[in-house]
Image (cartoon, rainbow, N blue to C red):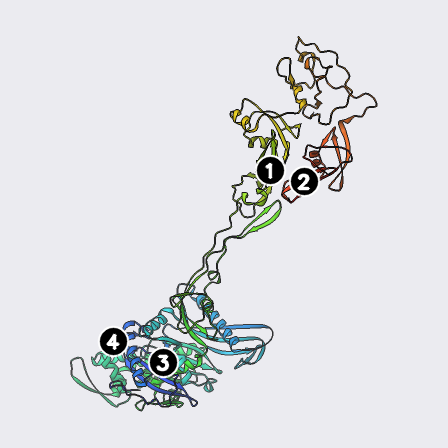
Amino acid sequence: MADNSRQAVKVNMEGVPEQLVFGLDIGTRSIVGTVGFKSTNGFVVVAQVCKEHQTRAMLDGQIHDIGKVALTIEEVHKKLEDMTGRRFKDVCIAAAGRVLKTVEAESQMVFQSDTVITSEHIYTLDMLGIENAYNILRDEKKTDDIRFYCVGYSVKRYYQNDYIISNLEGHKAMSIKAELIATFLPNEVVDGLYAAVERAGLYVANLTLEPIAAINVAIPEKFRLLNIALVDVGAGTSDISITKDGSIIAYGMIPSAGDEFTECIAKHYLTDFNEADKLKCASTINTEVEFYDIMGLPQRVSSEEIADVVEETVKNTTKSIADKIMELNGGKSSSAVFVVGGGGKIKGFTESLAEYLGLQKERVALRGSEVLGNVEFMQDDIKADSLLVTPVGICLNYYEQRNNFIFVTVNGERIKLYDNSKLTIMDAAIQMGFPNVDLFPKRGKTLIYFVNGEKRMLRGSEGEAAVVRLNGRQTGMSTPLEQNSKIDIIPSTRGDDAVLEISSLPEYSSNMNIIFNGKEITCPRFVTVNGELVSGFYEVQDLDRIEILGYYTLEQVLEFMDIIYRGKVYVNNVIAPMDTKVYDNFSIICEIMKEEPNYTELIEKYGDGQFPVTSDLLYNKDEGKEGEIPEAQNEFTEENIPASKTPEPVQEFTEELPEEFPYDEEYNEEYLPESEDTADGINSKQEMPADGEEDLTDNIINIIVNGDPAVLKGKQKYILVDVLDFYPVDTSVAHGDHLETSVNGMSCDFTMPVKDGDVIRIEWVER
């Protein structure tokens, strides 16, 4: 490794390609920066710089002081730029396996027909497996509060139509499946790494796990058929990975490594931590080492003595590593163990680990120059050893994912995306699990209701679309992404719920017109909701059943007119009870009584009704006041006639009644016109028809209505409104803007007399 005690020496960059990869191994004791490129024979390290932390800014692989770690990264970065004359902004890093969580998961894709498998299919399959692994991890934790970041994954095996295959790409399959192991770290660990790197002015181009980086160098794929364990013994952690049957089957970590040995030496020889660490490293190279204790006194000890001092600590650490290996390997030892990292170079480490695993000591060995045979160093002062395995592996891992992944930040969360050169903000939002419903405007609640049995729906209004910003600038969801893009998404909003008042219904807006005392008045239609009468201001609720009536009762009309004291009332020139149905264009004649509180106002507004001429029979003209029909009797008797008025004998009445002659159903008798044969204005009762004369009390006539035959019966005389009792005409709902009525081709209103054989039309039309 480069000697950083002197000024960095410029590297001859002749023949070096323009594109270089910059990797940082951010360790507990030191940071190693490596710049290089991939060659046809392996990997070329153009320049490498190592810088130790001046304080214990990191413990057990976790950054404790982000500012101090960032300063060290800046120093390493600047030296590499000075040595190469190049500028680097993107960097590859690796996370230690501190509090590492490893999960095994499966994923499967099924196609409708034989499909050629592409790299995108494989990526999707892998991502599904990672998602399944993440869900398993969350279920194990039984909480959503702790968030984990996937720092790496390894596919154990792929399946093509349920058959194992090493590479799916290019094959045809109906289904593909993957078995993989995914490794997760809490976001706090990853966030610390990103914060330190970004504070140093760099962007993370690739993040992997240290044991993944190490195993890609130390155990090539040709050796992974064997059951081999790789142990990367750093300063703060010992990271473990295991291969078997051609794939990586497990990752693990224990928080015990070289710093434990250093602390033991410092306590024994009374030195500070940094002096003890130098003493430890020197003991792996020299037979004797010299140092100064905290009293300033020079000391000289043998390497064997140092090994004896740390022997118990080494045994404790190697026992923990051995136990973890057997746990990850299904309860048994692996066939061999490769050890990399500076912490494993302490004397007696490999021998103790072999003893606890029950292996021959030759089966546990340090791996350095043996696994770096395909790595070329352009610096003369760098010697290949086990310390360089992880830094080189971090750089090589970039080439594995250089054209496949980019990292972006969405609402503060780092995510990794497969780069197909067509990535947009939408892809990032979907990948980080941003709810689709929060991306697009949301409608308010839809209102479903029924009008006269017809189902209708009113949609709520649309809300505002999501607000999207890319690197602080507002943009859209289809904006392309670049490496390290910073995305902020403010969720979309929901629109207002659908609101509808009865008065907004088109059927309600077609008012009823009634001729009252000769003047046209307009009445809103009556509406019931779920059987209860409501006003036009009623707000419709979900699943309401609305009925819009095409008529008023006579009593409702009078209530609408604010008429309380009711005298004589005629509907279409026929005296009518209060429950008579009044339809559009009907006429009403009403006597307005003087007892009305607003009598004067009503008379001025509507005037007094002009009753049919026969209504005068109700008045006693000689007395000059209204006569009353006895409530208990239907005909006059001597007791009902004033004593001063003796009627003449009643003459037989035989002449035919006029068609407009009113008929009072309440009293079941006709009012006769005055004639010379009526004494003193007192009406005579009509006698029964003589033998042979037609009885009209049940007059039956045949007519044609809208082309269909109809029969009217039950009355002496008929007018057009009587047709509605015998022929179904829907006047409750406006099916046009005008109800047209005619008799024998002549337009008329509902008071038109109807006779046998008449041709009638009653239909809705558009003007």
Q: Which mark is residue 663?
A: none
Which kind of residue does numbered mark 4 sit on?
Thr
Left or right of 146: which side holds 129?
right
Which kind of residue does numbered mark 2 sit on?
Glu
Q: Is residue 230 visible?
A: no
Task: Decide which of tag 2 and tag 3 comes sooner along the chain.
Answer: 3
Instruction: Write down the quadrant of residue 559 in the picture.
Output: top right
Which kind of residue does numbered mark 3 sit on?
Gly
* Disc 2/disc 1 C-alpha distance (Å): 14 Å
Task: Decide which of tag 4 and tag 2 comes sooner along the chain.
Answer: 4
* Disc 3/disc 4 C-alpha distance (Å): 22 Å
Task: Decide which of tag 1 and tag 4 comes sooner along the chain.
Answer: 4
Residue 579, given in percent of the width and then of the height, sits at: 63, 31
Q: Which residue is mark 4?
A: 55
Residue under the image location 29 percent in, 80 percent down:
78
Q: Which mark is residue 512?
A: 1
Label 2 secondary element: strand
Left or right of 613: which side holds 222?
left
